[in-house]
Image: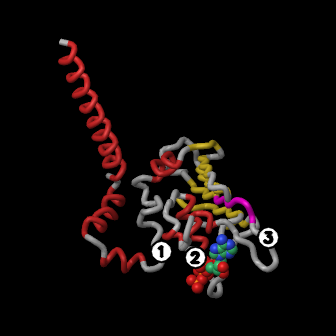
Amino acid sequence: MFLKRLELAGFKSFADRTELEFVSGITAVVGPNGSGKSNISDSIRWVLGEQSAKSLRGGNMQDIIFAGSDARKAVNFSEVSLTLDNGDNALSLDFSEVTVTRRLHRNGESEYFINKQPCRLKDITELFMDTGIGKEAYSIIGQGRIEEILSTRSEDRRGIFEEASGIVKYKSRKREASKRLEETEANLVRIRDLTSELE
Ligand code: ATP
């Protein structure tokens, strides 16, 4: 699986629709300070489901929408699409190419798509779980992240190894199953109370 294409429109400094094609091997993005290099990696984290405006270097999520410049008016929505080659079926979808899209409108409305089909954020998060590509995964190392990894709590460091070893999805399913179990137990207690009242 590799990153094939990134399309940005109205994302931070990318006011116009911009398409970046990646080939296999190493791609370097170079440019002067403030020209938008980090905005590219921000857009990748964002389309993968980042929910923290702070980690995208903004105050609120709408800050990622192109805010206008001397020459251009602000836009009303931001859209990013990330296309991955899935020839090796690393993503559990029966497509050789997978495109995930995220759109955010100024009124706060969010939309997510997988191969142009509307979906939930959860579907995108689950699709990338244990692939090393998710928003928290080790494949995106932002500025200062290496220091953070080295100095962080051992539990957080362990999370990185868990993602790499592919057990995150099982932990997440266990969490959901435990929650359902607790709810069922609470329902059982209620039923027992009701039957003892009726007896
Ligand atoms: P450096 O080399 O200094 O790290 P960089 O190339 O990584 O810089 P970025 O941090 O990606 O640059 O881009 C910063 C630029 O993006 C700034 O000029 C900022 O004004 C612009 N920018 C950020 N958010 C928006 C927005 N919502 N609308 C318009 N421009 C934005």
The part of the image, by quadrant, that contains residue 36 is bottom right
Q: Residue furthest front?
A: 197
Give whichever of discs 2 and 1 has the lower sequence position.
Answer: 2
* For discs 3 and 2, the disc positioned in front in the rendered view: 3
Label 2 lies in ligand 1 vicinity (Cβ under 8 Å): yes
Q: Local crowd at mark 2 within 10 Å, few (<14), some, or many (≥20)?
A: some
Alpha carbon separation for disc pair 2 and 1: 8 Å
**Please, what secondary structure does the residue beneath circle 3 have?**
loop
Label 1 lies in ligand 1 vicinity (Cβ under 8 Å): no
Q: Which mark is residue 142?
A: 1
Residue occupied by mark 3:
73
Q: Nearer the viewer, residue 57 or 81?
A: 57
> Height in image: 191 above or below 31?
above
User: Of the residues shown, which amino acid type is indicated by label 3?
Assistant: Lys
Residue 51: x, y in percent? 50, 60
Residue occupied by mark 2:
38
Name the image quarter holding the C terminus: top left
The residue range painted magenta reads: 75-80
Coloration of the structure image? secondary structure
Alpha carbon separation for disc pair 3 and 2: 22 Å
Is disc 2 in contact with disc 1, using a CB cutoff of under 8 Å?
A: yes
**Please, what secondary structure does the residue beneath circle 1 have?**
loop
Label 3 lies in ligand 1 vicinity (Cβ under 8 Å): no
> Height in image: 3 above or below 169?
below
Does residue 48 show up magenta in the picture? no
